[in-house]
Image (cartoon, rainbow, N blue to C red):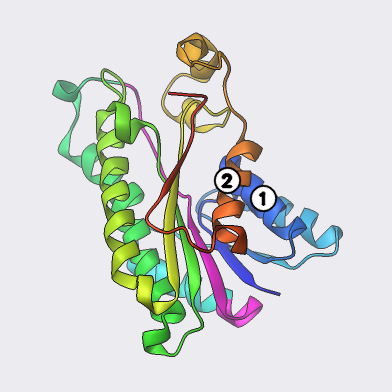
Amino acid sequence: MKTILITGASRGIGAATALLAARQGYAVSINYHKNRSAAEAVAEQIIHNGGRAVAIHADITREPDILRLFSETERQLGTIYALVNNAGILEQQMRLEHLTMERMERIVKANLLGPMCCAREAVKRMSTKYGGRGGVIVNVSSIAAKTGSPNEYIDYAASKGGLDTFTVGLSKEVAAEGIRVNAVRPSLIYTDIHTDGGEAGRVDRIKERVPMRRGGHATEVAEAILWLISEKSSYTTGSFIDVSGGI
């Protein structure tokens, strides 16, 4: 049974990915930062259905937490085969002139530096250069990396643009070492992250701008992530799947 580590997996896209991965036979490490009960509920659902799962607390903006997350995952579930860098944040909608340096630092640490550090630890374990057996990294970016999210979350968009560049660079760096690195770019997905940004009903407000005229669901993003992890995408690296309804 292969092990998958999913950051920010207590809710939304992360939780949907954890449940789908378990159904496909993976042992799942469910990382969470604040919502312990939700993470444990996801793990319990997987275990109840005959799978293997653990919920592990870690703040991915803190390097010691990341190191512990990886060591605990390996201790409890074995060698990590796949990493899904899903954890991320956004904050209240506003224009650039109202953004503080402290806020921008929080966004970049959570959405770019944390995933980079997690990927670093994954590479150390997966790379054939270091005796690993290969593996897969999937970064959860955002269609905001392409649109820039003006008047709302340009700091978030910029952090996801950085994640896209990192995806391309790392994919080339480790391609000959048995590691594939790809990303998904969701757009308007019905998750709690919009509440964090100050507008719980944002998807319904602007869904008519989407060519498909609807918001997406976390399970639809999870399907793309699991395809990128699977052998069905064995010749795919440095690539992006836009789960965006046509944006």
Q: Residue furthest front?
A: 235
Q: Is residue 198 above or below residue 48?
A: above
Residue 71 belongs to the span the image colors magenta: no
Quarter-of-image position of residue 141: top left
Which stretch appears magenta?
74-93
Classify mark 2: helix, strand or loop: helix
Q: Which residue was labeled with disc 1?
A: 37
* Depth order, front residue of 22/153: 22
Give the x, y percent position of residue 2. Answer: 65, 73
User: Which is more N-terminal, label 1 or label 2?
Assistant: 1
Q: Which mark is residue 132?
A: none
Q: Which residue was labeled with disc 2?
A: 224
Task: Give me the residue at 55% from left, 58% from top.
Answer: 233
Q: Is residue 73 above or below residue 91?
A: below
Task: Please name the amino acid that badge 2 sits on.
Answer: Ala
Q: Is residue 148 visible?
A: yes
Placement of the N terminus among the 4 image quadrants: bottom right
Q: Residue furthest right?
A: 49
Task: Give me the residue at 50% from left, 72% from top.
Answer: 135
How many other residues sit within 10 Å of disc 2, few (<14), some (14-19) or many (≥20)? many
Classify mark 1: helix, strand or loop: helix
Give the x, y percent position of residue 32. Answer: 54, 55
Report the Cα–Cα distance between label 2 and label 1.
Answer: 27 Å
Give the x, y percent position of residue 218. Answer: 61, 37
Task: Give me the residue at 74% from left, 59% from top.
Answer: 24
